[in-house]
Amino acid sequence: MSGRTVVLTGGVGGAKLVLGLQQVVEPSSITAIVNTGDDFRHLGLWVSPDIDTLLYTLSGQANAAQGWGREGESWAFMDALRRLGGEDWFALGDGDLALHVLRSARLAAGGTLTAITADFASAWGIGPRILPMSDQPVSTHLETDQGDLAFQTYFVEQRCLPVVRRIGFQGAAAARPGPDVIAAILAEDVQAILIAPSNPYLSIDPILAVPDIRDALCSARAPVVVVSPIVGGAAVKGPTAKLMRELGSAVSPAAVLAHYGDVVDAILVDERDAVLELGVPYDICDTLMHTLADRARVAKAALALADRVR
């Protein structure tokens, strides 16, 4: 497939798909639009977890076994923080800390998240273009049986244990898409727009909540293909299946499709899931991405589906 590929992504699953895409198309032809609803200020520093996961993954620095952070990380900062009685529920490795310090300093000096992210990607020789969904802060909050929780409190500190009743995105209505986001989606040379197998509620919905992004996807010339995050009636990792049940949804590819609604033109379904009438074109493959070859295979299957429905 020639032309550009746009990916809406967040978290580890999304980063795996983008890494797979790098193996099958020219890396510079990929644009990743990344969730920033997880971003938050911690110990005075601005942390962008989903952006950083993608930066680490594409630069070969990700800690694959851990699922977050950098390979070979050291923890002198956290050790010193604990000895001083500091807040230690959110781990910041020493190398990771450098990223947050530089980002925070540049934001305080008037820089934008888009420009800062581009500079980090360039410094590490990353080919795909990485675009934050917005340069304005958007904060994912969850209404739970333990009260209103900011995303990182729910996800890291509370380990996703509270029962979720509703999810909202503070600041989304007033936010604007990143300066190049809409143009990337609507560009004439885009051949496929992929929604990664990220958590639909926590990773993709924040992107769609930013004004104009959903409309751009619906009017794009390129087909929008979602890679189902459901494998055998469950989620590979994280709270996706738990959230779906708590919010009254079935845990199935059909439910994922219904959740995204008119945004999606086709869906790539895992071979372990029973497929009934989905109402849109679909293909079936093994969507588990344990190895680099797996990631390339899933990326290739998603692009082939987009090519079929284009």
Image (cartoon, grey):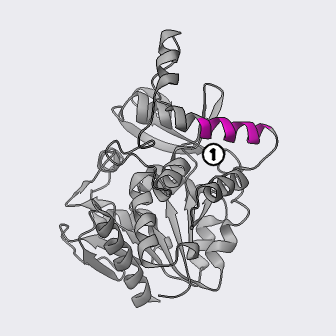
In the figure, 105 relative to 203: above or below? above
Which one is nearer the viewer's eye here, 229 or 77?
A: 77
Three-letter code, disc 1: Val
Which one is nearer the viewer's eye here, 246 or 68?
A: 68
x and y percent of residue 38 in the render? Answer: 53, 43
x and y percent of residue 39 in the render? Answer: 58, 41
Q: Is residue 104 magenta?
A: yes
Q: What secondary structure prevails in the magenta region?
A: helix
In the figure, 91 relative to 188: above or below? above
Q: Is residue 220 magenta?
A: no
| Residue at x 45% of width, y 43% of height | 70
- Furthest-right residue in this view: 110
Q: Quadrant of residue 105?
A: top right
x and y percent of residue 48 in the render? Answer: 58, 43
Which one is nearer the viewer's eye here, 281 or 198?
A: 198
- Furthest-top residue in this view: 84
| Residue at x 56% of width, y 85% of height | 3
x and y percent of residue 141 in the render? Answer: 52, 38
User: For the magenta stretch, what is the residue range?
Assistant: 98-108
Task: Determine whether, in the image, residue 298 is placed left or right of residue 32.
Answer: left
What crowding class fits label 1: few (fewer than 14 Cα within 10 Å), some (14-19), or many (20 or more)? many
| Residue at x 78% of width, y 47% of height | 111
The residue under label 1 is 138
Q: Quadrant of residue 246?
A: top left
